[in-house]
Image (spheres, rainbow, N blue to C red):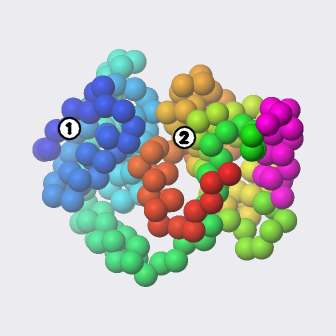
């Protein structure tokens, strides 16, 4: 069994190390020191159709056991092939809880207007990603979360940076979208028609 000690490593390093190990190993044990990292590693492995179990030894000691099935390896190869031929839709990156420079109150009004307008455009974006103080919009602003629920129902993927949620102490308040990590965020941006807001 391949063992990866990813304690003390910042996002997305635990995910990157896990992905590399999955290419050559049938069983992997990943050790991380926080819940967000354990969830990010597990999410990657599950997306690659591996069997995953998480053992929480302590608040700062998590073991993720990954069984890399044959199906997972085939999925990995299929993903590589698909990435060459698949044209992604627009991905919007919301990196702040306001839009533009200038008056803060105006910026907060504008970002809410921007997000609600996404429901009216065609085609809808493929993903909306929140990071840095942008995660506050996805958690604390009820009118925004209502808009995001509608977007999600319409098929738009909502990704929210787990490190950022943790930094602002909002991890347990997320009600819409998925907790994401820097690897998934960068991969989404890299393989899409990306727009930063």
Q: Is residue 86 magenta?
A: no
- The 10 Å Cα crowd at callout 1, few under 14, some 14 to 19, many 20 or more, is some
Q: Which quadrant is the N terminus positioned in? A: top left
Q: Which residue is at 23% across, 53% downward?
A: 20
Q: Position of residue 69 (x, y in %)?
A: 25, 60
Disc 2, SS: strand
Residue found at the far bottom of this picture: 85
Q: Position of residue 64 (x, y in %)?
A: 30, 38
Magenta region: 102-117
Q: Is residue 160 left or right of residue 115?
A: left
Identify residue for label 2: 161
In space, the residues marked 1 and 2 are separated at their CA atoms by 23 Å
Disc 1, SS: strand
**Against 83, is 149 above or below?**
above
The answer to whether residue 64 is seen in the rendering is yes
The answer to whether residue 174 is seen in the rendering is no
Give whichever of 6, 84 is nearer the camera: 84
Q: Which residue is at 21% across, 45% downward?
A: 28
Dominant secondary structure, magenta? helix
- The 10 Å Cα crowd at callout 2, few under 14, some 14 to 19, many 20 or more, is many
Image quadrant of residue 109?
top right
Identify residue for label 1: 4
């Amino acid at each position: 069994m391949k063992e990866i000690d990813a304690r003390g490593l910042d996002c997305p390093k635990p995910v990157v190390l896990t992905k590399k190990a999955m290419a050559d190993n049938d069983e992997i044990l990943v050790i991380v020191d926080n819940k967000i990292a354990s969830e990010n590693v597990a999410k990657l492995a599950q997306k690659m159709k591996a069997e995953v179990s998480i053992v929480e030894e302590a608040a700062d000691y998590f073991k993720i056991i990954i069984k890399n099935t044959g199906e997972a390896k085939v999925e990995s190869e299929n993903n590589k092939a698909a990435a060459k031929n698949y044209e992604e839709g627009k991905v919007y990156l919301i990196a702040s809880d306001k839009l533009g420079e200038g008056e803060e109150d105006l910026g907060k009004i504008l970002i809410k207007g921007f997000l609600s307008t996404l429901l009216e455009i065609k085609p809808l974006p493929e993903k909306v990603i929140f990071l840095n103080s942008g995660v506050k919009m996805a958690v604390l602003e009820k009118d925004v979360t209502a808009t995001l629920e509608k977007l999600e129902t319409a098929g738009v993927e909502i990704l929210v940076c787990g490190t950022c949620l943790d930094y602002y102490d909002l991890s347990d308040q997320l009600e819409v979208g998925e907790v994401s990590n820097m690897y998934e965020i960068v991969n989404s941006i890299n393989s899409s028609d990306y727009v930063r807001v």
